[in-house]
Image (cartoon, coloured by chain):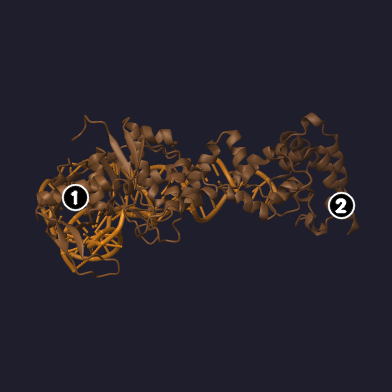
Chain colours: A brown, B orange
Amino acid sequence: MKNASLKVVTRFAPSPTGLFHVGGIRSALYNFLFARQHKGTFILRCDDTDKERSRKEYENYFLEVFKWLSLSYDEYYRQSERTEIYKKYLEKMIADGTAYISKEVPKEEGDKEEVIRFKNPNKKISFDDVVLGRIEFDTKDLGDFIIARDLESPLYHFATVVDDYEMKITHVIRGQEHVSNTPRQILMQEAIGAPQPIYAHASIILDKDRKKLSKRDPKVLPVLEYKSMGYLPEAILNFMAFIGWNPGTEQEIFTLDNLIGSFSLEKLQKPGAIFNSEKLDWVNKEHIKLLPKVKLLEHINSAIPEKIRNLPEWGEERLAKIIPILIERIVKFSDITQMAEAGEIDFFFQAPEYDAVNLIWKKDIDGGVIRAEIGNLIETIEKIPEESFTEAGIKEAILSFIGDKDRGSILWPMRYALSGIDKSPDPFTIASILGKNETVSRLKSAKKKLHLN
RNA sequence: GGCCCUAUCGUCUAAUGGUUAGGACAGAAGCUUUUCAAGCUUUAAAUCCGGGUUCGAUUCCCGGUAGGGUCACCA
């Protein structure tokens, strides 16, 4: 392979003209992975040649994204600070006759009367793409395209070619939407005497309507939105890596280090792939399961709303106990906030309020069974030794107490007395978390309710 | 419209000139079960169409169809 002996240098060049969106992550990731795998250099370049639309806040935004995702880069450049370099090339090209100053009739507001055009040699060019194979173009159709508005204002394609040359980029890994742009870049490379990098055009990322994922698409969110929804950076990376790439094995859950080890250009897909957020949810859940306890507690803690923290029995210790219950029921951490707002976790930190009728299991027609047994149930629980007051211990005691009585008639009321809601974890689990005193106290108030009726 | 690219379950994909075309997500059912969730098991679901080449094509070739990308003084 061409350049195989050279040190790998890749780059990712976002333009700060909007909030960096998820779709953009994939190219960044592939370039990062490839460079890291080959102990090469990964360059981040701010493509801010468009003075009108570039904004510092957008640059800060993608910088923050890179930080959040732990995608480290070795060098950082801003094209706006490299005007002198482009100017040098522009002057040389004009002197060489590969570019010329052209008089124009302005078509739009802001158009200039004089621009710099590339002198198109109108030839057939071809290149070998790692993903797509050999691609041929006749550049006649391109005409003498504009490469700069003036010596100080290069346009994207030109600046890119100069930078890729100056920065000794060996591999250009990007989406297939750039395939049609490649011939003009190659033409300019030839004009300035730059070598052709190796191209790998990954599949296009599509939205649900099979259209290219676009910044303007309201369904495609800026990256940090995913952060605030409680998606894990590793999950986002894992999921994005798999859009248009797979390791060729059946393993689907990868850490960033795993990805560095497994990535290969050869496994890149040709067909476009749809961004399927249901799969992202699953990947995220899998990564949540992988999280170390401390990290998990951190994430969960920050998803718990103030309202819950102000409850009488709130405590970090108890929160730690309900973690397994929580993660079983969520795909992302903001789901916890939602659960809290829906009143699904209050009862862990506060005795519930509810109507007595809810205590009665549907098969216990008029509540006869529970009215007769609740006293005994409480007694049974009181007798469980403190050291056996665990999920298993409680279950054993209660089940043997129930014997051949109808389980639902006892267990539903018990669970309801503890939780006060229709859907919750089982009563043994809740009881073990609440502790003996609180469990008994809640059951006693249930008993009181039952006998008032 | 010109040019370019693509085509396996709904989705992401694996595989091969000869396979029961595999996996995952989502779906359905069952188990478990007091409810919810989780888990486990099972299940349904695909090679775009038409020609070749070949003993044999999902795979190779051609055509069609469909989809997508790109054609800025944006990136």
Q: Which type of secondary structure does the marked residue at label 1 adopt? A: helix
Indicate the amino acid at tag 2: Arg
Q: Which residue is mark 1?
A: A90
Which x, y percent locates residue B56?
18, 48
Quadrant of image for the N terminus of chain A: top left
Left or right? Give the position of A157 relative to A124: right
The answer to whether any part of residue A147 appears in the image is yes
Which x, y percent locates residue A7?
26, 31
Q: Which mark is residue A371?
A: 2
Query: Mark 2 belongs to which subunit?
Result: A
Question: How many other residues sit within 10 Å of disc 1, few (<14), some (14-19) or many (≥20)?
Answer: many
Towards the viewer: A253 or A431: A253
What separation in Å lies between label 1 and label 2 (alpha carbons)? 91 Å
Towards the viewer: A132 or A371: A132
Which x, y percent locates residue A389?
77, 34
Left or right? Give the position of A332 relative to B6: right
Quadrant of image for the C terminus of chain A: bottom right
Residue name at image x 20 percent, y 63 percent:
A114
Towards the viewer: A397 or A183: A183
Indicate the amino acid at tag 1: Leu
How many numbered circles does the render carry?
2
Which x, y percent locates residue A105?
20, 69
Where on the picture, by quarter, is residue A192?
top left
Left or right? Give the position of A272 relative to A334: left
Residue name at image x 81 percent, y 59 percent:
A357
